[in-house]
Image (cartoon, rainbow, N blue to C red):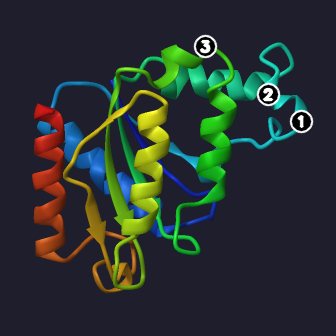
Amino acid sequence: MITVIASTNRKESGARQFAVHYCELLRQLTDEPVQLLALEEIPHDWFHPDMYDPDKQAPSLRRLQETYILPADKFVFVVPEYNGGFPGVLKLFLDAVSVYRYRDNFHGKKAALVGIASGRAGNLRGMEHLTGILNHLGVVVLPDKLPISSIERLTNAEGRITDPDTRKVIEQQARAFLEF
């Protein structure tokens, strides 16, 4: 199973638009189950000091973990640039789900990273930071990270990716990821 993660809790984000596109593309390219986890939709009742105690974590967090993290063997992180890095909600989520069944969550699994930004660097710095964290968790990251810049010029009013070159590089990465 592949879980595509729109890595921000900002409503109606560009990350979600790109994650939806990636999910649709993967579903066309593979028979493997593909699911979307949009961090903007998750409950936040698990964010409290007891989130680091597996016996006191919120049931909603355990459901997210059992649905999207534990059964997946591959992840695609669509990561917007926030202050030269990646969104804090993603780090918080990774920290929280790593408490219960630490090794089973990510160790030995694979990930692809798509960085998006309204600026020029496509979140290169954020993807490198996230790579270090994922490597620490035991995730093998596809070397072909995909930085996408100036995202507002690549989509239409409905949020669909209209730029043919962008669609092409996303498909190239998705195909490489499926073979990875």
Q: CA distance from mark 2 to mark 3?
A: 12 Å
Q: CA distance from mark 1 to mark 2?
A: 7 Å
Q: Residue at x 30, y 56 (%)?
A: 21
Upstream in sequence: badge 2 or badge 3: 2
Which element type, helix, strand or loop, lies under badge 2? helix
Which element type, helix, strand or loop, lies under badge 1? helix
Q: Residues within 10 Å of mark 1 (few under 14, many from 20)?
A: few
Say whether marks 1 and 2 touch (CB < 8 Å): yes
* Relative depth, front residue between 35 and 62: 62
Q: Residue at x 10, y 33 (%)?
A: 179
Residue 101 numbered tag: 3
Q: Which residue is mark 2?
A: 52
Q: Residue at x 45, y 39 (%)?
A: 134
Amino acid type of the residue that numbered disc 1 sits on in the rendered structure: Pro
Amino acid type of the residue that numbered disc 2 sits on in the rendered structure: Tyr
Picture coordinates of residue 37, whole percent (x, y): 50, 41
Q: Residues within 10 Å of mark 2 (few under 14, many from 20)?
A: some
Which element type, helix, strand or loop, lies under badge 3? loop
